[in-house]
Image (cartoon, helix red, strand yellow):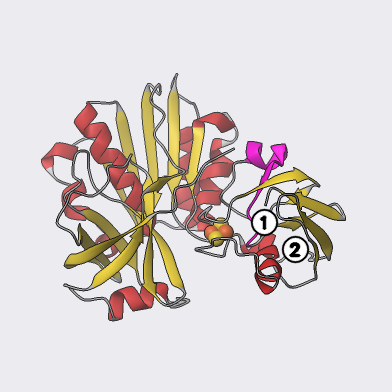
Amino acid sequence: MRQLESKTLLVHVNKIEDEAIDIKSFELVSADGKLLPSFIPGSHIDVHIADGIIRQYSLCNGPGNTQSYLIAVKKEAASRGGSRAMHEQIKVGDTLLIGMPRNNFSLIQEAKRHVLLGGGIGITPLLSMARHLLAAGADFEMNYFSRSIKHTAFHEVLSSPEFKGKVVFHYALEPDAVRAYLRKLLWSRPEGAHLYLCGPRFFMDQVEATAAATWPPHAVHLEYFVADPMSLAGPQDAFEVTLARSGGTYVIPEGQSIVDVLAQHGVRIEVSCEQGVCGTCLTGVLSGTPDHRDVFLSNEEKVRGDVILPCVSRCKSPKLVLDL
Ligand code: FES
Protein backbone atom coordinates (compact mmCIF):
# COMPACT_ATOMS: atom_id res chain seq x y z
CA MET A 1 0.00 0.00 0.00
CA ARG A 2 1.23 3.51 -0.70
CA GLN A 3 2.44 5.59 2.18
CA LEU A 4 1.87 9.35 2.12
CA GLU A 5 3.85 11.84 4.16
CA SER A 6 1.73 14.43 5.89
CA LYS A 7 4.18 16.65 7.83
CA THR A 8 4.04 20.39 7.29
CA LEU A 9 6.56 23.22 7.41
CA LEU A 10 6.53 27.03 7.44
CA VAL A 11 7.91 29.02 4.53
CA HIS A 12 8.20 32.68 3.58
CA VAL A 13 7.21 33.97 0.15
CA ASN A 14 10.53 35.28 -1.14
CA LYS A 15 9.60 36.32 -4.66
CA ILE A 16 6.49 36.53 -6.86
CA GLU A 17 6.84 36.91 -10.63
CA ASP A 18 4.44 37.18 -13.55
CA GLU A 19 5.31 34.20 -15.73
CA ALA A 20 2.53 34.52 -18.34
CA ILE A 21 -1.00 35.83 -18.67
CA ASP A 22 -2.81 34.74 -15.49
CA ILE A 23 0.20 32.72 -14.28
CA LYS A 24 2.42 33.81 -11.39
CA SER A 25 5.36 31.97 -9.90
CA PHE A 26 6.10 31.96 -6.17
CA GLU A 27 9.53 31.34 -4.67
CA LEU A 28 9.24 29.91 -1.15
CA VAL A 29 12.06 29.75 1.38
CA SER A 30 12.14 28.02 4.74
CA ALA A 31 10.98 30.27 7.59
CA ASP A 32 13.83 29.01 9.82
CA GLY A 33 16.51 29.79 7.24
CA LYS A 34 17.43 26.12 6.78
CA LEU A 35 17.45 24.19 3.54
CA LEU A 36 14.12 22.72 2.46
CA PRO A 37 13.66 18.93 2.19
CA SER A 38 14.94 17.42 -1.04
CA PHE A 39 12.45 16.03 -3.53
CA ILE A 40 12.30 14.09 -6.75
CA PRO A 41 11.09 15.65 -10.02
CA GLY A 42 7.33 15.52 -10.52
CA SER A 43 6.69 16.18 -6.80
CA HIS A 44 4.03 18.54 -5.51
CA ILE A 45 3.34 20.26 -2.22
CA ASP A 46 0.14 21.18 -0.40
CA VAL A 47 -0.10 24.94 0.15
CA HIS A 48 -2.37 26.04 3.00
CA ILE A 49 -3.59 29.27 1.44
CA ALA A 50 -6.28 30.27 3.90
CA ASP A 51 -8.62 28.66 6.40
CA GLY A 52 -9.93 25.49 4.80
CA ILE A 53 -8.23 26.20 1.47
CA ILE A 54 -5.41 23.79 0.67
CA ARG A 55 -4.20 23.37 -2.89
CA GLN A 56 -1.55 21.22 -4.54
CA TYR A 57 1.15 22.79 -6.69
CA SER A 58 4.01 21.06 -8.49
CA LEU A 59 7.60 21.99 -7.73
CA CYS A 60 9.36 23.46 -10.77
CA ASN A 61 12.90 23.36 -9.38
CA GLY A 62 15.85 21.66 -10.94
CA PRO A 63 18.14 19.21 -9.11
CA GLY A 64 20.06 20.19 -6.02
CA ASN A 65 18.13 23.39 -5.35
CA THR A 66 16.66 23.11 -1.87
CA GLN A 67 17.30 26.72 -0.85
CA SER A 68 13.83 27.49 -2.18
CA TYR A 69 10.79 25.86 -3.77
CA LEU A 70 9.38 27.29 -6.98
CA ILE A 71 5.69 26.83 -7.78
CA ALA A 72 3.47 28.44 -10.41
CA VAL A 73 -0.24 29.13 -10.12
CA LYS A 74 -2.73 29.85 -12.86
CA LYS A 75 -5.61 32.10 -11.87
CA GLU A 76 -8.58 29.99 -12.88
CA ALA A 77 -11.72 31.69 -14.14
CA ALA A 78 -13.75 29.10 -12.22
CA SER A 79 -11.53 29.33 -9.12
CA ARG A 80 -12.97 27.76 -5.97
CA GLY A 81 -10.93 30.34 -4.07
CA GLY A 82 -7.41 28.88 -4.11
CA SER A 83 -5.85 30.31 -7.24
CA ARG A 84 -7.64 33.64 -6.80
CA ALA A 85 -6.29 33.97 -3.26
CA MET A 86 -2.77 33.06 -4.41
CA HIS A 87 -2.93 35.78 -7.06
CA GLU A 88 -4.74 38.48 -5.12
CA GLN A 89 -3.88 38.02 -1.46
CA ILE A 90 -0.48 36.38 -1.13
CA LYS A 91 2.36 38.92 -1.00
CA VAL A 92 6.15 38.79 -0.76
CA GLY A 93 7.09 38.32 2.90
CA ASP A 94 3.95 36.36 3.81
CA THR A 95 4.32 33.15 5.79
CA LEU A 96 2.63 30.02 4.47
CA LEU A 97 2.21 26.51 5.78
CA ILE A 98 3.12 23.88 3.22
CA GLY A 99 3.18 20.09 3.15
CA MET A 100 6.27 17.97 2.55
CA PRO A 101 6.90 17.20 -1.13
CA ARG A 102 4.97 14.17 -2.33
CA ASN A 103 5.28 12.34 -5.57
CA ASN A 104 2.82 10.43 -7.67
CA PHE A 105 4.44 11.28 -10.99
CA SER A 106 8.04 10.07 -11.13
CA LEU A 107 10.51 9.71 -13.91
CA ILE A 108 11.23 6.08 -14.76
CA GLN A 109 14.91 5.53 -14.02
CA GLU A 110 15.38 2.72 -16.53
CA ALA A 111 13.66 4.56 -19.40
CA LYS A 112 15.86 4.92 -22.49
CA ARG A 113 14.01 8.03 -23.67
CA HIS A 114 11.61 10.42 -21.93
CA VAL A 115 8.83 12.19 -23.89
CA LEU A 116 7.28 15.07 -21.93
CA LEU A 117 3.95 16.50 -23.11
CA GLY A 118 2.57 19.56 -21.33
CA GLY A 119 -0.52 21.67 -21.88
CA GLY A 120 -0.82 25.14 -20.27
CA ILE A 121 -0.10 25.20 -16.54
CA GLY A 122 0.53 21.43 -16.76
CA ILE A 123 4.08 22.38 -17.66
CA THR A 124 5.05 22.83 -13.98
CA PRO A 125 5.97 19.24 -13.00
CA LEU A 126 7.44 18.69 -16.47
CA LEU A 127 9.74 21.69 -16.08
CA SER A 128 11.28 20.08 -13.01
CA MET A 129 11.58 16.78 -14.88
CA ALA A 130 13.21 18.50 -17.86
CA ARG A 131 15.72 20.27 -15.62
CA HIS A 132 16.66 17.00 -13.92
CA LEU A 133 16.91 15.10 -17.23
CA LEU A 134 19.07 17.83 -18.71
CA ALA A 135 21.42 17.77 -15.72
CA ALA A 136 21.61 13.97 -15.92
CA GLY A 137 22.38 14.04 -19.65
CA ALA A 138 19.33 11.83 -20.28
CA ASP A 139 17.65 11.44 -23.65
CA PHE A 140 14.43 13.49 -23.63
CA GLU A 141 12.16 15.81 -25.57
CA MET A 142 9.40 18.14 -24.46
CA ASN A 143 6.33 19.33 -26.37
CA TYR A 144 4.61 22.32 -24.79
CA PHE A 145 1.11 23.34 -25.97
CA SER A 146 -0.31 26.74 -25.05
CA ARG A 147 -2.63 29.44 -26.38
CA SER A 148 0.09 31.93 -27.31
CA ILE A 149 3.60 32.89 -26.36
CA LYS A 150 2.13 35.29 -23.78
CA HIS A 151 0.28 32.37 -22.16
CA THR A 152 3.47 30.28 -22.02
CA ALA A 153 4.91 30.12 -18.50
CA PHE A 154 8.67 29.64 -18.24
CA HIS A 155 9.07 30.37 -21.95
CA GLU A 156 12.35 32.14 -21.32
CA VAL A 157 14.02 29.30 -19.47
CA LEU A 158 12.70 26.62 -21.83
CA SER A 159 13.89 28.52 -24.90
CA SER A 160 17.35 29.16 -23.45
CA PRO A 161 20.41 27.62 -25.15
CA GLU A 162 20.67 24.78 -22.61
CA PHE A 163 17.30 23.42 -23.80
CA LYS A 164 18.13 23.89 -27.50
CA GLY A 165 16.76 21.03 -29.57
CA LYS A 166 14.87 19.59 -26.60
CA VAL A 167 11.70 21.72 -26.41
CA VAL A 168 9.08 22.29 -29.11
CA PHE A 169 6.47 25.01 -28.47
CA HIS A 170 3.01 24.79 -30.05
CA TYR A 171 0.78 27.86 -29.96
CA ALA A 172 -2.95 28.20 -30.55
CA LEU A 173 -3.39 24.83 -32.25
CA GLU A 174 -6.95 23.85 -33.09
CA PRO A 175 -8.01 20.46 -31.61
CA ASP A 176 -7.70 18.78 -35.02
CA ALA A 177 -4.16 20.07 -35.44
CA VAL A 178 -3.23 18.84 -31.93
CA ARG A 179 -4.70 15.43 -32.77
CA ALA A 180 -2.79 15.26 -36.06
CA TYR A 181 0.48 16.28 -34.39
CA LEU A 182 0.03 13.74 -31.60
CA ARG A 183 -0.69 10.98 -34.11
CA LYS A 184 2.59 11.78 -35.85
CA LEU A 185 4.54 12.04 -32.60
CA LEU A 186 3.14 8.92 -30.96
CA TRP A 187 2.58 6.59 -33.92
CA SER A 188 5.37 4.35 -32.69
CA ARG A 189 7.10 3.97 -29.38
CA PRO A 190 10.90 4.14 -29.47
CA GLU A 191 12.33 1.20 -27.58
CA GLY A 192 12.31 1.82 -23.82
CA ALA A 193 10.61 5.23 -24.14
CA HIS A 194 8.24 6.56 -21.48
CA LEU A 195 5.62 9.26 -21.91
CA TYR A 196 4.73 11.83 -19.22
CA LEU A 197 1.78 14.15 -19.61
CA CYS A 198 0.16 16.89 -17.64
CA GLY A 199 -2.38 19.52 -18.68
CA PRO A 200 -6.09 20.23 -18.98
CA ARG A 201 -8.37 17.23 -19.04
CA PHE A 202 -9.31 17.41 -22.75
CA PHE A 203 -5.60 17.55 -23.63
CA MET A 204 -4.76 14.59 -21.38
CA ASP A 205 -7.68 12.59 -22.80
CA GLN A 206 -6.52 13.31 -26.32
CA VAL A 207 -2.93 12.28 -25.63
CA GLU A 208 -4.00 9.16 -23.75
CA ALA A 209 -6.36 8.09 -26.53
CA THR A 210 -3.72 8.65 -29.21
CA ALA A 211 -0.97 6.89 -27.25
CA ALA A 212 -3.21 3.92 -26.41
CA ALA A 213 -2.74 2.44 -29.88
CA THR A 214 1.04 2.11 -29.64
CA TRP A 215 2.21 2.82 -26.07
CA PRO A 216 1.57 0.19 -23.36
CA PRO A 217 -0.11 1.52 -20.18
CA HIS A 218 3.05 1.02 -18.09
CA ALA A 219 4.89 3.51 -20.35
CA VAL A 220 2.34 6.32 -20.00
CA HIS A 221 2.42 8.48 -16.85
CA LEU A 222 -0.12 11.17 -16.01
CA GLU A 223 -0.59 13.89 -13.43
CA TYR A 224 -4.08 15.34 -13.04
CA PHE A 225 -4.73 18.71 -11.40
CA VAL A 226 -8.49 18.51 -11.40
CA ALA A 227 -11.16 15.97 -10.64
CA ASP A 228 -13.00 14.02 -13.30
CA PRO A 229 -16.46 15.66 -13.44
CA MET A 230 -17.97 12.66 -15.25
CA SER A 231 -16.92 10.23 -12.58
CA LEU A 232 -17.97 12.54 -9.71
CA ALA A 233 -21.39 12.89 -11.32
CA GLY A 234 -22.07 9.12 -11.29
CA PRO A 235 -24.81 7.43 -9.20
CA GLN A 236 -24.58 7.98 -5.45
CA ASP A 237 -26.37 5.01 -3.89
CA ALA A 238 -26.18 4.62 -0.12
CA PHE A 239 -23.89 1.97 1.42
CA GLU A 240 -22.48 1.00 4.82
CA VAL A 241 -18.95 1.57 6.10
CA THR A 242 -17.46 -0.42 8.97
CA LEU A 243 -14.25 0.69 10.68
CA ALA A 244 -12.22 -2.45 11.38
CA ARG A 245 -9.86 -1.06 14.04
CA SER A 246 -11.85 1.60 15.88
CA GLY A 247 -15.21 -0.10 15.49
CA GLY A 248 -18.51 1.36 14.37
CA THR A 249 -20.69 1.00 11.30
CA TYR A 250 -22.12 4.04 9.53
CA VAL A 251 -24.50 4.54 6.63
CA ILE A 252 -23.15 6.77 3.84
CA PRO A 253 -26.26 8.28 2.28
CA GLU A 254 -26.65 9.57 -1.24
CA GLY A 255 -24.93 12.95 -1.66
CA GLN A 256 -22.52 12.65 1.29
CA SER A 257 -18.94 11.45 1.24
CA ILE A 258 -17.39 8.83 3.53
CA VAL A 259 -15.12 11.58 4.91
CA ASP A 260 -18.08 13.82 5.77
CA VAL A 261 -20.15 11.13 7.44
CA LEU A 262 -17.22 9.84 9.51
CA ALA A 263 -16.37 13.41 10.58
CA GLN A 264 -19.95 13.82 11.84
CA HIS A 265 -19.24 10.84 14.10
CA GLY A 266 -15.91 12.16 15.34
CA VAL A 267 -13.71 10.08 13.04
CA ARG A 268 -11.37 12.45 11.25
CA ILE A 269 -9.61 11.49 8.03
CA GLU A 270 -6.96 13.97 6.92
CA VAL A 271 -8.00 15.69 3.69
CA SER A 272 -6.58 18.32 1.39
CA CYS A 273 -8.11 18.69 -2.10
CA GLU A 274 -11.38 16.85 -1.31
CA GLN A 275 -11.66 16.18 -5.04
CA GLY A 276 -9.88 12.85 -5.41
CA VAL A 277 -6.77 14.48 -6.84
CA CYS A 278 -4.08 14.67 -4.15
CA GLY A 279 -4.14 11.31 -2.32
CA THR A 280 -4.07 12.81 1.20
CA CYS A 281 -7.12 10.83 2.39
CA LEU A 282 -5.84 7.48 1.07
CA THR A 283 -7.30 4.71 3.26
CA GLY A 284 -6.91 0.93 3.27
CA VAL A 285 -9.84 -1.28 2.26
CA LEU A 286 -10.21 -4.67 3.96
CA SER A 287 -13.37 -5.83 2.19
CA GLY A 288 -16.04 -4.56 -0.16
CA THR A 289 -15.75 -3.26 -3.72
CA PRO A 290 -14.72 0.40 -3.94
CA ASP A 291 -16.38 2.57 -6.55
CA HIS A 292 -13.35 4.71 -7.41
CA ARG A 293 -14.19 8.30 -8.41
CA ASP A 294 -10.68 9.78 -8.04
CA VAL A 295 -7.96 10.60 -10.55
CA PHE A 296 -5.14 9.76 -8.12
CA LEU A 297 -4.95 5.96 -8.15
CA SER A 298 -3.59 4.11 -11.14
CA ASN A 299 -5.89 1.75 -13.04
CA GLU A 300 -3.96 -1.15 -11.53
CA GLU A 301 -4.54 0.14 -8.00
CA LYS A 302 -8.21 0.69 -8.74
CA VAL A 303 -8.59 -2.88 -9.96
CA ARG A 304 -6.72 -4.22 -6.90
CA GLY A 305 -9.25 -2.43 -4.69
CA ASP A 306 -7.20 -2.43 -1.46
CA VAL A 307 -7.19 1.36 -1.06
CA ILE A 308 -9.76 4.10 -1.53
CA LEU A 309 -9.92 7.92 -1.60
CA PRO A 310 -12.90 8.42 0.70
CA CYS A 311 -13.29 12.15 -0.04
CA VAL A 312 -14.98 11.22 -3.34
CA SER A 313 -15.08 7.46 -3.83
CA ARG A 314 -17.99 5.27 -2.84
CA CYS A 315 -18.80 1.54 -2.79
CA LYS A 316 -20.28 -0.81 -5.37
CA SER A 317 -21.10 -3.50 -2.80
CA PRO A 318 -23.56 -2.87 0.07
CA LYS A 319 -20.74 -2.78 2.64
CA LEU A 320 -17.18 -1.47 2.80
CA VAL A 321 -14.74 -2.34 5.60
CA LEU A 322 -11.97 0.24 6.06
CA ASP A 323 -8.62 -0.14 7.79
CA LEU A 324 -9.41 2.57 10.33
FE1 FES B 1 -7.30 14.81 -1.89
FE2 FES B 1 -9.00 12.96 -0.90
S1 FES B 1 -8.33 14.78 0.00
S2 FES B 1 -7.77 12.84 -2.66
Tell me which image quadrant ligand 1 sits in.
bottom right
Measured along the vertical axis of the image, is residue 92 above or below residue 322?
Answer: below
Horizontal relation, residue 124 to residue 92: left or right: right
Q: Quick check: marks 1 and 2 in contact, CB under 8 Å? A: yes
The residue carrying mark 1 is 293
Q: Earlier in the sequence, mark 1 or mark 2?
A: 2
State which quarter of the image contains the N terminus. top right
The residue carrying mark 2 is 234
Q: Amino acid at mark 1?
A: Arg
Query: Does any portion of residue 181 appear in the rendered image?
Result: no
- In percent of width and height, residue 188 lies at 49, 26
- In percent of width and height, residue 236 lies at 78, 66
Which type of secondary structure does the marked residue at label 1 adopt?
Answer: loop
Q: Which residue is pictured at 28% across the width and 44% down the height?
A: 128
Which type of secondary structure does the marked residue at label 2 adopt?
Answer: loop
- In percent of width and height, residue 154 lies at 22, 55
Measured along the vertical axis of the image, is residue 255 above or below residue 60?
Answer: below
